[in-house]
């Protein structure tokens, strides 16, 4: 993105802090005035001392000293405001941006997360925004001070010697142009750094989350080698960055020296010819020093500026990620859900590869009906379930809930009406109580315990070290698979949805845990419209209807007895699975 585009999109974040920004710039003006007065004072004292020493009394000197002391107090107070309140404003803007980024992430579809590394996402909402605090504060402040000093310096220096001033100011744009190339290279290098930090985070996360697999295969050294390679690549990028930064800094110093040479040579010649008084040349040199310090500060600020702009750019790239699933215009909440689900000629292909997953599905599920989905892997069972809460939208056709197109319902009301229990249970880092209460924010302890009892989880929870206040560890690592699954079921009990989606909820459990979880699921499914993706076909005998998906379509439909009598795909799957179980026994 171009810098102007980024600044245009970043500027609205200042709106909440307009009063602080105005006060900050006012303080910046005060500090500039205080700094610019010193050369004038020295010029006055030198000129008066050289031309009319008798006019320079102790009282005059003390008055000037008092005035300058007062100005320094004002300068100190203004600087304090800029350093404290200005930085707080920058941190507030960084906080606002991070909140916006996280809120935007909550709106993105599964497709985005399937194609983006978590480490990259984390880098964009954490480290990428660290430099925004300094950038947001100093960017307007530094440029305002530079503009003010340049204008004031030009006016004062022109009154001393216009020709010398013009020569000096002609060199400034030449310096800026010469530095532009290195400046752009530094920005590119900073962006490469940011990208690689994301990759480094992704590598660390991948290795740490898979640490059991790493140890099981004794591949610790493999992971160390991979990390070291990424780390050395990051070092090479930083070394490349510092090379351009060094060239950048050296260019500035060369032009600094050139300007002083001009002042010394041209100023000395003008003084010999009587065009500049000695005191004026001293004042002139002081102003040039101030001007050069300002230019140097602005150019050096370019490093911070580019860091900030890189962070802003990566933030904007995140914010520009398309929200595929959103509330349609005029979407209304659904109330008193009965649970009738209808698929009208529904087809679906994933956006990234466009491979057909479902083709022209027509299906009606009655309120309270228990439907099981079976079939070979890749047949579209999970996809069908994912379409109902709008984790994805159909490529063609429509899905109705109680006769209403789910696209015309608000996402919050739609998803509040649907409970999902998956094979891969995710528990948040926290306590058992917090994980169950997640199903209904604000639920009291009695409601949580009641839900746990319904899920058959209360007994084992009470036996834990701290009961409901037991810390479950990251992703629930301190609990067994069956325990985690029953906690997730308790979470759905607390939510009390009218529609229930069970995605192979017992597939990864041992026989004892499967039995306990199945009992909990039977209680949960009572009176609710239920879609069950079945891994073990023996668990779906009681389903009102079984749908067999193959080749992206529903190829068989009926209850267990009817499908077994047909001796089709379901019969083959069932007898094959039972044969394997018998062999296992």
Image (cartoon, rainbow, N blue to C red):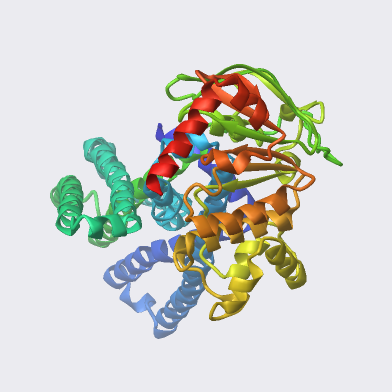
Q: Is residue 61 above or below residue 32?
A: below
Question: Residue 507 in the image: x percent, y percent?
Answer: 50, 47
- The location of residue 263, given as percent across then percent down, is 19, 50
Nearest the camera: 576 or 204? 576
Give coordinates of residue 209: x percent, y percent: 35, 56
- Left or right: 231 in relation to 300: left
Q: Residue at x 55, y 26 (%)?
A: 570
Q: Is residue 82 left or right of residue 154?
A: right
Residue positioned 76% across, 48% down in the render: 526
Q: Nearer the viewer, residue 544 or 371?
A: 544
Quadrant position of the N terminus in the picture? top left
What is the number of callouts on the image?
0
Return the residue nearer the eye: 218 or 20: 218
91 vs 453, left or right, is: left
Residue 390 visible in the picture:
no
The x, y position of residue 193, in whole percent, is 27, 47
The answer to whether residue 550 of the structure is visible from this angle is yes
* Residue positioned most to the right: 336
Q: Quadrant of residue 368?
A: top right
Q: Residue at x 43, y 37 (%)?
A: 579
Front residue of 347 and 458: 458
């Amino acid at each position: 993105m171009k810098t102007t585009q980024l600044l245009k999109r970043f500027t609205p974040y200042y709106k909440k802090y307009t009063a602080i920004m105005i006060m900050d710039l006012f303080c910046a003006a005060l500090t500039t005035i205080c700094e610019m007065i010193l050369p004038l004072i020295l010029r006055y004292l030198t000129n008066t001392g050289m031309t009319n020493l008798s006019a320079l009394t102790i009282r005059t000197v003390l008055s000037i000293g008092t005035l300058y002391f007062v100005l320094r107090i004002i300068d100190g107070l203004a600087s304090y405001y800029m350093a404290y309140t200005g930085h707080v404003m920058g941190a507030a803007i960084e906080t606002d941006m991070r909140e916006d980024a996280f809120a935007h992430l909550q709106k993105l579809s599964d497709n985005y997360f399937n194609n983006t590394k978590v480490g990259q996402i984390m880098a964009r909402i954490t480290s990428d925004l660290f430099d925004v605090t300094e950038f947001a504060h100093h960017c307007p402040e530094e440029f305002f001070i530079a503009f003010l000093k340049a204008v004031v310096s030009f006016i004062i220096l022109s009154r001393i010697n216009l020709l010398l001033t013009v020569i000096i100011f002609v060199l400034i744009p030449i310096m800026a142009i010469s530095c532009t190339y290195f400046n752009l290279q530094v920005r590119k290098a900073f962006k490469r750094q940011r990208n690689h930090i994301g990759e480094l985070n992704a590598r660390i996360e991948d290795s740490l989350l898979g640490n059991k697999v790493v140890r099981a295969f004794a591949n610790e050294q493999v992971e160390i080698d991979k990390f070291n390679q990424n780390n050395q690549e990051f070092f090479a990028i930083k070394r490349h960055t510092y090379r351009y930064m060094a060239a950048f800094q050296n260019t500035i110093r060369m032009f600094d020296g050139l300007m002083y040479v001009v002042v010394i040579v041209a100023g000395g010649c003008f003084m010999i010819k009587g065009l500049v008084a000695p005191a004026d040349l001293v004042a002139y040199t002081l102003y040039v020093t101030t001007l050069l310090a300002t230019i140097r500060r602005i150019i050096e600020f370019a490093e911070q500026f580019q860091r900030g702009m890189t962070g802003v750019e990566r933030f904007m790239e995140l914010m520009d990620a398309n929200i595929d699933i959103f509330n349609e215009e005029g979407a209304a909440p659904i109330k008193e859900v009965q649970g009738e689900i209808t698929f009208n000629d529904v087809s679906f292909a994933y956006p990234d590869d466009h491979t057909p997953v479902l083709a022209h599905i027509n299906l009606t599920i009655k309120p309270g009906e228990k439907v099981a989905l079976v079939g070979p892997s890749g047949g579209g069972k999970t996809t069908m379930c994912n379409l109902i809460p709008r984790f994805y939208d159909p490529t063609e056709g429509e899905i109705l809930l109680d006769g209403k197109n789910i696209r015309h319902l608000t996402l919050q009301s739609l998803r509040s009406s649907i409970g999902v229990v998956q094979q891969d249970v995710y528990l948040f880092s926290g306590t058992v109580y917090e994980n169950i209460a997640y199903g209904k924010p604000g639920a009291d302890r009695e409601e949580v315990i009641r839900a746990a009892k319904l899920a058959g989880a209360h007994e084992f929870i009470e036996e834990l070290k701290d009961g409901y206040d037991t810390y479950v560890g990251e992703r629930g690592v301190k609990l067994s698979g069956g325990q985690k699954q029953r906690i997730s079921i308790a979470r759905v009990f607390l939510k009390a949805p009218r529609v229930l989606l069970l995605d192979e909820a017992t597939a990864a459990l041992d026989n004892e845990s499967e039995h306990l979880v199945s009992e909990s699921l039977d209680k949960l499914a009572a009176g609710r419209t239920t879609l069950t993706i079945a891994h073990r076909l023996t668990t779906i005998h009681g389903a009102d209807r079984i749908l067999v998906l193959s080749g992206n379509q529903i190829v068989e439909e009926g209850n267990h007895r009817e499908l077994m009598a047909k001796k089709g795909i379901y019969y083959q799957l069932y007898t094959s699975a039972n044969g394997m179980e018998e062999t296992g026994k």
